[in-house]
Image (spheres, helix red, strand yellow):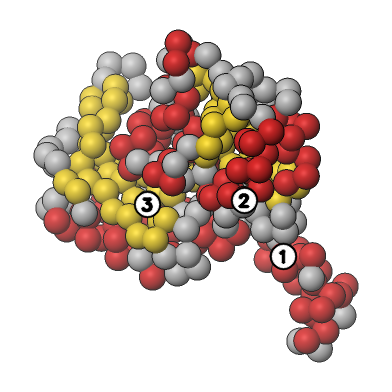
């Protein structure tokens, strides 16, 4: 765990990223301001674990450990930013549920963060003379990736289109619409590296960034969280595609002695907003 000074007059900002293999928690001290009561955030502490499929074991204990080490309490948290997708279905559900529960108990406001934007924002700032673009790629199984492209704007990265899920075979056509040089990064790149290496061999305008870009730095996560819009509204996950369970619903239902219609009714009931 990394730590800094823990003093704060405006409370704490907690940022959570459970959308990929590396679970990330970042804690910051909110700086009082004149307009909305908050002017900025100072980094306090962070925790990271590479625990695919096991985030639930680390989420609450990790937050508790950070707070205890700094002599702070959950009630000091005023804002909670949580990555809402796209990414791991299980990781998103677990982290969003924790954010909602913690907000309900502390009265903190919530904000959702775009996983692809977090990945791309630091890389976009390194573009030489702001030329070219960055495409963030997140693994989506089934020979697909979640993808979104960005350019470096005056104050932050500017999206060149919405996030989407694309088959690997569709990426050359998508990349052809983007400025060059085009830097590629993220877990979607790493898990399909031979495909992208071959692609880059035919397109000299593509740059494959090294593995340390596959996850954002906690400080970058906290920085994006400090610029998010907060409210008391419930956060909704951004999935972009149906889950594996939904696509295999008939087989799963049959294994439990249910019809597909009955299973769909249960699924709909569990997905209905409270």
Q: Position of residue 183 (x, y in %)?
A: 54, 30
Q: CA distance from mark 2 to mark 1?
A: 25 Å
Disc nearer the start of the sequence (2/1): 2
Q: Residue at x 45, y 69 (%)?
A: 54
In the rendered image, the quadrant that contains the N terminus is bottom left
SS of the residue under disc 1: helix
Circle nearer the N terminus (2, 3): 3
Which residue occupies the foreground of this view, 270 or 213?
213
Question: Residue at label 2?
Answer: 194
Quadrant of residue 108 in the image?
A: top left
Relative to 21, 263 lies left or right: right
Check disc 2 and report its element: helix, strand or loop.
Answer: helix
Where residue 165 appears, as percent x and y from the top left, is 71, 44
Q: Mark on residue 244?
A: 1
Residue ID at (33%, 16%): 35
Residue 258 in view here: no
Q: Is residue 6 left or right of residue 35?
A: left
Residue identifier under label 3: 24
């Amino acid at each position: 765990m990394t730590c800094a000074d823990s003093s704060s007059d405006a409370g704490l900002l907690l940022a959570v990223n459970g959308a990929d293999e590396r679970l990330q928690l970042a804690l910051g001290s909110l700086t009082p301001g004149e307009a909305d009561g908050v002017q900025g955030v100072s980094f306090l502490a962070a925790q990271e674990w590479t625990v695919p499929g096991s985030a639930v074991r680390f989420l609450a204990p990790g937050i508790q450990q950070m707070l205890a080490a700094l002599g702070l309490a959950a009630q000091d948290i005023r804002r909670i930013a949580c990555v809402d997708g796209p990414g791991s279905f299980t990781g998103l559900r677990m982290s969003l549920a924790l954010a909602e529960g913690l907000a309900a108990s502390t009265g903190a406001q919530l904000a959702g963060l775009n996983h692809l934007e977090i990945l791309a924002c630091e890389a976009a700032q390194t573009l030489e003379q702001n030329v070219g673009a960055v495409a963030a790629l997140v693994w989506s199984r089934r020979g697909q990736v979640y993808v979104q492209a960005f350019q470096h704007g005056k104050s932050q990265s500017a999206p060149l289109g919405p996030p989407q899920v694309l088959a690997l075979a569709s990426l050359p056509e998508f990349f052809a619409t983007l400025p060059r040089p085009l830097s590629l990064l993220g877990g979607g790149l790493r898990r399909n590296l031979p495909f992208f290496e071959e692609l880059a061999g035919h397109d000299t305008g593509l740059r494959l960034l090294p593995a340390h870009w596959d996850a954002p730095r906690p400080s970058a996560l906290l920085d994006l969280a400090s610029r998010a819009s907060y409210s008391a509204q419930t956060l909704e996950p951004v999935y972009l595609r149906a889950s594996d369970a939904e696509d295999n619903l008939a087989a799963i239902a049959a294994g439990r002695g249910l019809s597909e219609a009955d299973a769909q009714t249960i699924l709909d009931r569990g997905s209905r907003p409270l």
